[in-house]
Image: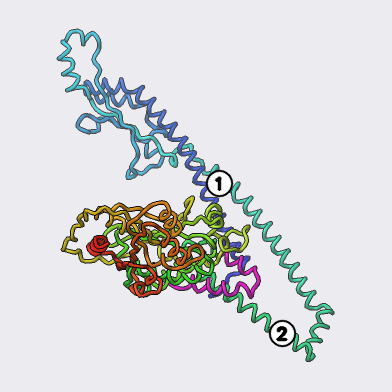
């Protein structure tokens, strides 16, 4: 396809603008005059109705056509009135004045009319001789004598329509615009001549001739080759950047300018340090989602992603506390698990860096929306000062040129995670103490269980137990079972709280998960055993865990008369264990 010169493009654009302006001016001017003419015609029709109604009423009352014609005679050959008709109650034309031939209006053209009913009015002396009921009956039955129709002359057929005035208006618009266009063409031609003259002078200059002769030497050839290679390298980089921008445009139809700004920002940084991030960002926005969808268990997928980052969390001394809720959390979901897991990994990985030496709370909630559609909400909260500052500045997922490149601002991993979230149709929300991701998911409906669970009955024992579980959901379930069994329950939020409660209160048993018997920087299991030996009333230890190997571990064997219960907890087995204490 042949390309149009830039000057020709300007000419076409100016011509279109010129035509549009001319049409708009003519339309506004015509509508203004037409409206003024209609107002004058309406006043004329009102004057005719008020002046001619008595005579028309008299003629219709006695059926005298001659009186009607003499009444309408002054309107003949009036160019402002197209026609006037008098109709009886049956719609028959009794008398009329037609001036359409005078102003050149065809009989086929339908005109807008002003209709007014002719009503008979009784005199006061006549009314006094009849009872009021008869007058009301007569007024209701014989009040209307006929109708008066008036059609005024339209504006384009009237004397007010002046073609010369419209011609002067068009000339007043066309001449200034045409003169301005001639001025622009002269300026453009003058600038073109200057540029061509400069090019000719450069091509014919002595210095350029000498430089061109020097290029014929071996050193000149090396210089040309080096310049050529550099030009090719620059063109390749520009080509990749153009492809990247094109992929961004295809990936997000809403033309998210923030992505383009971020690309421009990182390309201004050191090339060697930003190329890896740039290529990772390129792969993220290039890859589609929902093309390789699979059925996966929602809770397993979420838990597995968190577990895979546990090593990094230990290195950064970040305690991750995840919890689950929702009536669809135990269902299978239909989604692109690879892209979803990548999004979650990028997000949690950077939040671990942000919440270093602090606790990161992650809550997953999957609830039914409509039929098999559910909403997944992932909430992140922490007491980390850096995290709270990022919430205040709202800089986790936004590009802000004034802020530096850190873990919580201008972070390409977080922006990449946000981009994948957008592809899934999700959104992110800032709150005062947390940030939440929301996205729709399709769940697979499960067959409902027909059998009713066995009812939990109280044991009738007077026991006081302490419960600790790092999983809030499992802890709530365990406390619920113990309450139904009639056991007095106290709970501890951390391992240190367990020690404090043992020093001040007496318990028959302690129910903890397997994480309790593992050492960490703030808790020593060996010290716990030593303090346990000094207690007057030593409680029974019950380990509640998914991991069956805990029952064979060395730490478990160090606990005297310790019991083990597997998760998910069986209320019947729990009751038997407490009864045998």
- Residue at (74% x, 67% y) in the render: 193
Decide: is 552 above or below 78. below
Residue 336 visible from this viewpoint: no
Front position in the image: 427 or 288: 427
Q: Position of residue 517 (x, y in %)?
A: 41, 67
Query: Does residue 20 belong to the magenta stretch?
Result: no
Q: What element does badge 1 sit on?
A: helix
Decide: is 466 above or below 77. below
Q: What range is drawn magenta here?
A: 260-288
Dot 2: few (<14), some (14–19), or many (≥20) neighbours within 10 Å? Answer: few
Residue 223 location, quadrant? bottom right
Residue 40 location, quadrant? top left
Residue 465 visible from this viewpoint: yes
Which quadrant does the C terminus fall into? Answer: bottom left
- Residue 130 is labelled as none
Residue extending furthest toward the bottom: 218
Front position in the image: 193 or 395: 395
- Residue at (42% x, 57% y) in the render: 498
Q: Position of residue 305 (x, y in %)?
A: 42, 70
| Separation of residues labelled 1 and 2 (CA atoms) | 67 Å
Q: Main secondary structure of the magenta part?
A: helix
Q: Position of residue 352 (x, y in %)?
A: 51, 65
What's the colour scheme?
rainbow
487 on left or right of 10: left
Decide: is 471 above or below 393. below
Q: Which residue is mark 2?
A: 226
Q: What element does badge 2 sit on?
A: helix
Q: Position of residue 374 (x, y in %)?
A: 32, 60
Decide: is 111 above or below 422. above
Q: Which residue is mark 1?
A: 167
Query: Does residue 280 belong to the magenta stretch?
Result: yes
Dot 1: few (<14), some (14–19), or many (≥20) neighbours within 10 Å? Answer: few
């Amino acid at each position: 396809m042949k390309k149009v010169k830039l000057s020709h493009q300007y000419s076409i654009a100016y011509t279109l603008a010129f035509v549009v302006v001319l049409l708009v001016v003519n339309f506004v001017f015509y509508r203004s005059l037409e409206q003024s003419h209609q107002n004058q015609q309406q006043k004329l029709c009102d004057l005719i109705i008020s002046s001619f109604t008595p005579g028309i009423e008299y003629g219709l009352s006695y059926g005298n056509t001659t009186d009607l014609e003499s009444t309408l005679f002054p309107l003949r050959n009036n160019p402002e009135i197209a026609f006037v008709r008098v109709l009886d109650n049956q719609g028959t034309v009794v008398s009329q004045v037609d001036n359409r031939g005078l102003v050149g209006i065809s009989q086929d053209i339908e005109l807008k009319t002003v209709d007014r009913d002719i009503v008979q009015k009784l005199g006061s002396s006549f009314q006094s001789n009849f009872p009021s009921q008869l007058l009301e009956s007569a007024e209701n039955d014989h009040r209307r004598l006929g109708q008066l129709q008036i059609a005024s002359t339209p504006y384009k057929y009237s004397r007010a329509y002046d073609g010369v005035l419209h011609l002067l208006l068009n000339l007043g618009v066309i001449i200034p615009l045409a003169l301005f266009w001639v001025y622009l063409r002269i300026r453009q031609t003058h600038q073109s001549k200057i540029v061509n003259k400069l090019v000719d002078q450069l091509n014919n200059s002595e210095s350029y001739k000498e430089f061109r002769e020097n290029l014929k030497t071996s050193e000149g050839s090396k210089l040309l080759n080096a310049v050529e290679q550099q030009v090719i390298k620059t063109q390749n980089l520009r080509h990749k950047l153009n492809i990247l921008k094109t992929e961004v445009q295809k990936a997000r139809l809403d033309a998210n300018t923030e992505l383009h700004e971020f690309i421009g920002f990182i390309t201004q940084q050191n090339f060697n340090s930003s190329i890896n991030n740039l290529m990772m960002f390129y792969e993220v926005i290039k890859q589609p989602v929902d093309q390789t969808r699979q059925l996966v268990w929602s809770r397993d997928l979420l838990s597995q992603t968190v577990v895979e980052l546990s090593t990094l969390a230990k290195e950064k001394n970040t305690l991750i506390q995840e919890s689950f809720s929702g009536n669809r959390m135990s269902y299978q979901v239909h989604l692109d698990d690879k892209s979803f897991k990548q999004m979650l990994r990028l997000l949690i990985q950077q939040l671990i860096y942000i919440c270093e030496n602090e606790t990161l709370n992650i809550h997953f909630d999957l609830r039914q929306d409509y039929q098999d559609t559910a909403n997944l909400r992932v909430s992140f909260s922490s007491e980390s000062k850096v995290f709270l500052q990022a919430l205040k500045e709202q800089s986790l997922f936004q590009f802000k040129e004034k802020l530096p490149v850190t873990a919580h601002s201008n972070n390409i991993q977080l922006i990449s995670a946000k981009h994948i979230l957008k592809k899934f149709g999700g959104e992110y929300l800032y709150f005062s103490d947390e940030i939440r991701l929301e996205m729709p998911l399709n769940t697979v409906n499960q067959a409902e269980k027909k059998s009713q669970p066995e009812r939990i009955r109280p044991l009738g024992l007077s026991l006081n137990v302490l419960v600790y579980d790092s999983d809030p959901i499992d802890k709530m379930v365990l406390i619920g079972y113990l309450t139904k069994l009639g056991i007095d329950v106290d709970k501890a939020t951390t391992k240190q709280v367990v020690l404090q409660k043992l020093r001040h209160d007496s318990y028959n048993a302690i129910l903890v998960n397997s994480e309790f018997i593992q050492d960490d920087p703030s808790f020593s299991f060996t010290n716990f055993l030593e303090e346990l030996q000094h207690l007057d009333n030593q409680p029974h230890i019950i380990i509640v865990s998914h991991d069956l190997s805990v029952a064979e571990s060395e730490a478990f064997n160090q606990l005297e008369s310790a019991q083990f219960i597997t998760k998910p907890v069986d209320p019947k087995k729990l009751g038997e264990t407490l009864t045998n204490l």
